[in-house]
Amino acid sequence: MSKPLENHWTAVVNGEQKHLEIAQTTRLVDVLRTHLHLTGTKVSCEVGRCGACMVLMDGEPVNSCLVMAYQCAGSDITTIEGLHGEEKGTLHPIQQAFVEEGGFQCGYCTPGMVISTKALLDAHPEPSHEQIETGLCGNLCRCTGYGGIIRAVRKAGERCAIRETSAEETVS
Amino acid sequence: MLLNREQSGKRWHLRPDGAPKVTGQLQYLTDMTLPDMIHGRVLRSEYPYARILSIDTSEAEALEGVYAVLTSKDVPGLNRFGIATPDQPVFCEDIVRYVGDAIAAVAADSPERASLALDAIRVEYEELTPLNSTDAALAPGAPELHEHGPGNVLHRTEIKRGDAEQAFATCDHIVTETYYTPRQMHAYMETEGGLFVPDEEGRLNVYAATQHGYKDRMQLARIIGCPEEDIRVVSSPIGGSFGGKDELNVQPYGALLALRCGRPVKMHNSRKESVRAGLKRHPMKIEMQTGMSREGIIQAHRVRITADTGAYATLGAPVLNFCTEHCLGPYAIPNVDVEGVSVYTNNGLSGEFRGFGGNQAIFAMEGQMDRLAAIMNMDPWEFRRRNMREKNDPGPLNQRILVTDGLSQVWEALDRSELWQKHQSPPADPSLPPWIKRGVGAAIAMHGAGLGYGIPDPAGGRLSLNNEGKIEVAFSYEEFGQGLVATLEIMLCDLFQCSTSDLSIIIGDTDRVPHSGSSTASRSTTMAWMALQRLQTPFRSRVLAVASEMYGVPADELVTGPGGVWRKGQLPAGSSEAETPEKAERIEVAEIVAVGNESTQIAENYLGASQYLAKDEAPSGLVISYAELATQGEADEWIFDTKFDYPTTPDNVVGGHYLYTYAAVAAEVEVNTLTGATKLLDTRHVVAAGPVINPMGYIGQIEGGSVMALGFTLTEDAVMQDSRYVTTNFDTYLIPTIQDIHTNLEVEAIEDLPEGDAFGPRGIGEIGSVALAPAITAAIHQATGVWVNRLPVPREQLVRPLNVPLQEGVSPS
Ligand code: FES
Ligand code: FES
């Protein structure tokens, strides 16, 4: 017989170990927004369709409205608050590109978009148009018509590629 | 000018709210929390139409952790709201008229407990047969949903000119068609909600999205039965609205619960609740009959509009007015017979939505134009030109309008475009399988801005030098994503040659802004521009006069500049430019904003967002800084106010507009005739709306409007069955994703305005969304020969059997 779940939950969130006493059936989005006050992760459809709640779980993009606490206990979670440039307090090249290219309007979809873009560029540093479409088709945006987002993703791709090349050069 | 980043050069202005938005630090009003807050929920109707026999809240009240259960008995003031016609009950007393109707509200110590309490409220209903269509509602003997009938008619419109009856008799060709448009959903990403905080002085602080804080304040005061000054409404930033948050939504419940409990109450609708309770675009049936002479000149136009306004009035009447005005298109038609009716039903709630009834009208009218051109065997664009109004002709309602060249300019620019030229000889692509068909279509529109004649449309604004030495503007407009704050920054930097760090921009807080009208009807850019035109001279004169007095330099040798007042000719190079991309490279993120902090800080944190942008280096050689100036004299001597009305036509035609923007759109589509799927390949929007102040915002509004129109055309419909929503979330209500959008979209801006035009840049919030649908359906016609008359385009109409040889071994079914 399986043991009843205990309410002790721990995970690494944005690089910090977190311990909470919560029901294991709490949704990750509520763990983040309500219990950890990380309201950068947004909530909109709650059925896994809009991507506003996207976070990285062990590096993979997941809809945090569909993940229960017990499913992510012990994992490494990155939210929009965990993304930054080379130093804390600066913008990540993806965030920078969204600002420069007008990749947002109301901004409510933006944290999710940025997170999905991060996952996309991690997998495909120089994504083709099809890869951008596939990578971001789980994120809805009602304001921008996606034009600015696509331009931002392309620019971020170029930037990340440059950064990576220069990093390799320093290593070699 | 083709509008893109490259063409925009230094006017490509980075939004001050960029860094907080891309880092997730920006707190929307639905992100706000307070340590001692409780949670509010609303009990909504089980039926679209029913009589309430009894409501028993005792069990809910007895639950542990429940602080309040409110029903209609608990509304101290007016138990009704609605911007134009307050006929929507805060809580229903005896009848429910749609599935979003509110019966009770609860506040409890957790959202879970609040929903338990909702379940514990016992409501007995007598179910009635819903009026699930306008036909049912107009049928003789149909029950009347409201006392203020007659019947179930909210509003009627009429335009009659000449003698249509007679003219039709002499016409050589007549096209008759009925057009249907869907119940489109705003689908803003942030659902309705906010925080409601009573304070020690007995005031209520409302942090909830709206397009017009003052209007909310007025309505809430009426509901609560208190002076308006007892309420403060903080209403920006907003995670999208598109017209959908203009009416009150959660505010009455949050406000009443907070006052009853004496504690902060948080409300946040789930998506399902948002769909069920919220506004939609009016579904319309538009019957049109258009007749022309042998030469292809339109002689007569008969239109019957039936709009399903749903359970309550909201802005149903003005929407119908707008639709009526726009169903004549930008054409000169001598004999006109238009009638419109807006009908109450039990089908949800229709209201304001980007385009405001123009989208439906333009889809129908442009559809007629293509059909007429086809009968004439004439190029549809040339056919439009022959029938277009002349520059000096009156507007659609025979009213005087401001003369511009916009219409002919957009016509010509589109005519020249490569995309439209393809229309002449659709390129045959032999690499495509035979069931893939391509076509190109186009449409043109004139679209009124402002609320129109006879509707109070106040505007104004405040410009001041605040005591920190910032040039401060305050408007009652809202930032719901359109980039208003960035546009204001650009305007102010242009006017005063100052830098963004000299500015303080205040919006979205009734305690801090003057009453200057709402962010609706594509009006804020024009209004802000006009206000600043009026305010700049008195403001500048005082600044220069004081500086001149202090330093003994004649005022006419001084100018305003970055940081303060400068001697003429000595401004630092490039100072008049808005933030450049180079500066943007230095964007840094400020300290993380504490969450759940003293809530009143939120607006300030947001509005102080320009701190995120790199500050200019302290300029040398200036005469006096703004900060020093601000210490001279009394603070109120540095404040300048203006009040005026949005320009309207001088002619007495209710709803008639004075300012119009113009657009032409071409679209190329690819139709898969095996599946009926349509893909938008290439689009060009030509827009004549005066000077482009903020290119990034302009492109974004047109792109966003265009994709919203794409959804309106191909996929979006909040389907109802027996007055209940079938499509309740984004899994079945399909808005375009990044995979569904135009492969290519170009925006061409025509910036000319007549010499001495006093109204400046026109708003472009709606013009991108009004003419795409007919362009797409025209393209579908060229591709497939099917005349589409219903949106979203029914796929089954486009499926064509093909004589494709069957594969070996596959038996025909
Ligand atoms: S809120 Fe999670 S996908 Fe929409
Ligand atoms: S920017 Fe508003 S939803 Fe994407």
Image: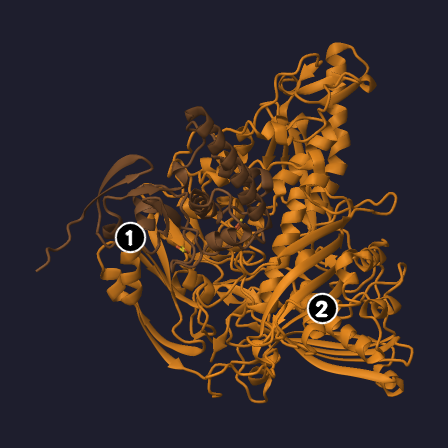
Quick one: which residue is furthest to the top in this view?
Answer: B552
Tell me, for residue B428, which label it has, or none: 2
- Disc 1 is placed on an element classified as loop
Dot 2 crowding, Cα within 10 Å, few <14, some 14–19, many 20+? few
The answer to whether residue B774 is left or right of residue B587 is right
Tell me, for residue B110, which label it has, or none: 1
Q: Which mark is first along the chain, 2 or 1?
A: 1
In the image, residue B252 above or below residue B204: below
- Disc 2 is placed on an element classified as loop
In the image, residue A167 above or below residue A131: above
Colour seen for chain A: brown
Chain letter for the orange part? B
Amino acid bearing label 2: Ala
Question: Measured from the top left, where is residue B705 in percent x and y?
Answer: 63, 56
The answer to whether residue B57 is left or right of residue B436 is left
Tell me, for residue B766, which label it has, or none: none
